[in-house]
Image: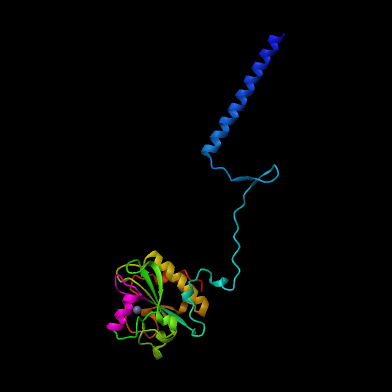
Amino acid sequence: MQLLTDEIKRRMFSRVFIFFSCLFALGGCVSNDEPMPEIVHSSGSESILIPPRVVSPKRSQGSAYNNIPRDWFPPSQLEKKWVAVVIHHSATENGNAAIFDRMHREHNHWEGVGYDFVIGNGTDSGDGEIEVTFRWRKQIPGAHCGGTANNWANRDGIGICLVGDFSHTVPTARQMQSLLKLIRFLQKRYGISKSRIYGHKTTPGARITDCPGRRFPMARLKSMLNY
Ligand SMILES: [Zn+2]
């Protein structure tokens, strides 16, 4: 009798052992090969799926200008009303604000670089790096688009120069990203619509020029602006 009972116990134990071994093997396959949803255990015994993380927009005085570099904002006591943006290329393979500043002083006898902003192409400044010049900081007229009636484009237009010769090449992706960000900021701050975003050569009244180069993607740029 005792022998019989031991035999039954042994068989039951071995069946239970095989059952749990199979379960373990199956579980191992799933967790190794299949991406599983992330599960956390709440304080109770239930498991819950983690929802997508929601990040609330920061509420601050400058919330409309999040991630805008401080030097894009002119000193408030000097800030004037701007009505247009004029885009240029440097027509050189390389350069930066300091190099153009020297060129414009020495060759053109201007008081310094003619543009308000210079966007680098990775040669003499970072690829897509935006340099702010003394003209923007002082809010004084530019020297980038001569010939217009009453010099309006220099007086009331913001001059942005992208380093590069877009008669032969195109701006880098980072230059275009930076240009878009800068133009969107200027549009918002001064209420400039995209009909007032000009390439140098299409600025009303400007002298004949190829600037910013026939390969500059003006139509694509405008298609990415909202208004
Ligand atoms: Zn130009």
Q: Where ligand 1 lies, by image quadrant?
A: bottom left
Q: Nearer the viewer, residue 169 or 94?
A: 94
User: Going by the image, does 177 lie left or right of 214?
Assistant: right
Q: Residue furthest left?
A: 107
At which x and y percent is residue 59? Answer: 61, 69
Q: Residue furthest right?
A: 1
Name above or below for residue 195 compared with residue 181: below
Q: Nearer the viewer, residue 204 or 189?
A: 189
The span shown in magenta is 88-107
Residue plotted at (34% across, 82% down): 112
Name above or below for residue 10 compared with residue 38: above
Q: Quadrant of the N terminus?
A: top right
User: Going by the image, does 169 lie left or right of 225?
Assistant: left
User: Going by the image, does 194 lie left or right of 19?
Assistant: left
Name above or below for residue 34 compared with residue 195: above
At which x and y percent is residue 166? Answer: 32, 71
Does the magenta segment cover residue 52? no
At which x and y percent is residue 39? Answer: 61, 45
Residue plotted at (40% across, 69% down): 129
User: Going by the image, does 29 lie left or right of 221?
Assistant: right
